[in-house]
Image (cartoon, helix red, strand yellow):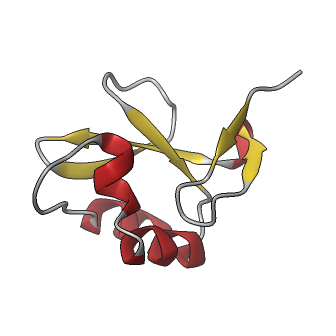
């Protein structure tokens, strides 16, 4: 049985393999495709729709426990291709 995680954008549950893990590194949010980077992680569907929902809800800061401004441009660039 595969682990289930919750997307921080749409808040729906999905298998871990269908989600993208993101972590915080010096107040920059980076995509962790292999899910091995150290630190607190959050899970997101790899779609622009879920990304925009997470930004609008300010979910990255809450999920990763980051205070202040959160730079998510790295994740957005990865999702844009």
Measuring from the top left, give residue 54's x and y in whole percent.
45, 67
Vertical comparison of 42 with 50: above or below? above
Q: Is residue 81 visible in the rendered structure shown here?
A: no
Residue, x 14% and y 50% (percent of image)? 67
Marks counted in the figure total: 0
- Left or right: residue 6 compared with residue 73: right
Measuring from the top left, give residue 38's x and y in whole percent.
32, 22
Vertical comparison of 41 with 78: above or below? above
Measuring from the top left, give residue 17's x and y in whole percent.
72, 39
Residue, x 44% and y 23% (percent of image)? 36
Measuring from the top left, give residue 4's x and y in whole percent.
74, 34
Between 22 and 55, the one lying in front of the other is 55
Between 51 and 37, the one lying in front of the other is 51
- Left or right: residue 13 compared with residue 27: right
- Left or right: residue 50 compared with residue 54: right
Q: Is residue 33 visible in the rendered structure shown here?
A: yes
Image quadrant where one finds the N terminus: top right
Vertical comparison of 35 with 79: above or below? above
Q: Residue furthest right?
A: 1
Vertical comparison of 23 with 39: above or below? below
Residue, x 20% and y 46% (percent of image)? 66
Residue, x 54% and y 64% (percent of image)? 9
């Amino acid at each position: 049985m595969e682990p289930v995680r919750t997307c921080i954008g749409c808040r729906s549950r999905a298998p871990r393999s269908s989600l993208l893990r993101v972590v915080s590194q010096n107040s920059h949010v980076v995509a962790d495709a292999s899910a091995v980077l150290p630190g607190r992680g959050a899970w997101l569907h790899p779609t622009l729709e879920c990304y925009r929902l997470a930004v609008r809800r300010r979910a990255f800061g809450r999920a990763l426990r980051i205070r202040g401004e959160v730079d998510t441009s790295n994740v957005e660039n990865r999702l844009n291709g």
